[in-house]
Amino acid sequence: VGGLMQPISDALKLFTKEIFQPTISNSWLYVFSAMFMLIMGLSVWTLYPSFNSIMYYSFGMLLFFCMLSLNVYSVVFLGWSSNSKYSFLGCIRAAAQMISYEVSLILIIFFPMLVYMEFSWYKPIASFPSSAMFFPLLVLWI
């Protein structure tokens, strides 16, 4: 019971905080970029397969990569719309870091896509508990 109320108290604290917005910023683009990041972050979860899922994405992993790469644009727009050169430099640095992490994530996830010959999330996640691929991949890794 000790940590059960933690998410609720964090949400209350977040909703009661003061809304910070730079005074000389392009307010419409600033708010839109933040909302776009939230929407893209939540929409990635629609790609996760479940047994009760109504939608089947045959290229779900590729759509996942595309959705992740769109967040870079919103970070750049956040820094640019603040009309501050320091914020813009920080957002360019953050965008470069996001791109470098995305490249390594794509390379890590691309190998199982080639092993399963599947661009959907269903087959790799359905066969994840089985360890049939463990030993062939171990030999390749060594």
Image (spheres, rainbow, N blue to C red):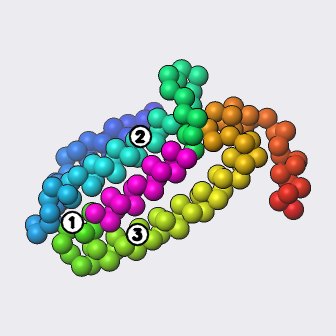
The residue carrying pointer 1 sits among few (fewer than 14), some (14 to 19) or many (20 or more) residues within 10 Å by Cα, namely many
For badge 3, the amino acid type reads Ala
Residue carrying label 1: 81
Relative to 140, does residue 80 appear above or below in the rendering? below
First in sequence: mark 2 or mark 1?
2
The reply to whether residue 2 is visible in this rendering is no
Regarding residue 13, the answer to whether it shows in the image is: yes
Residue named by callout 3: 94
- Towards the viewer: 86 or 74: 74
Magenta stretch: give its range. Answer: 62-77
Q: Position of residue 78 (x, y in %)?
A: 27, 63
Residue 98: which numbered mark, if any? none
In the rendered image, which quarter is residue 59 located in? top right
Residue at mark 3 to residue at mark 2: CA–CA distance: 22 Å
Q: Name the residue rendered at 58%, 35% in the picture.
A: 58
Q: Position of residue 142 (x, y in %)?
A: 87, 62
Q: Residue at x 85, y 53 (%)?
A: 138
Distance in Å between CA atoms under marks 2 and 1: 24 Å
Amino acid under disc 1: Ser
Residue occupying the point 57% across, 31% down: 49
22 lies left or right of 39 = left
Q: Residue at x 15, y 55 (%)?
A: 28
Which secondary structure dominates the residues rendered in magenta? helix
In the picture of the structure, the residue carrying the numbered disc 2 is: 43
Asked whether 70 falls inside the magenta stretch, the response is yes
Using residue 120 as the reference point, say whether residue 97 is left or right of it: left
Element assignment for label 3: helix
How far apart marks 3 and 1 lie (CA) works out to 15 Å
- Amino acid at the residue labelled 2: Ser
Labels 3 and 2: the sequence-earlier one: 2
Image quadrant where one finds the N terminus: top left
Q: Nearer the viewer, mark 3 or mark 1?
A: 1
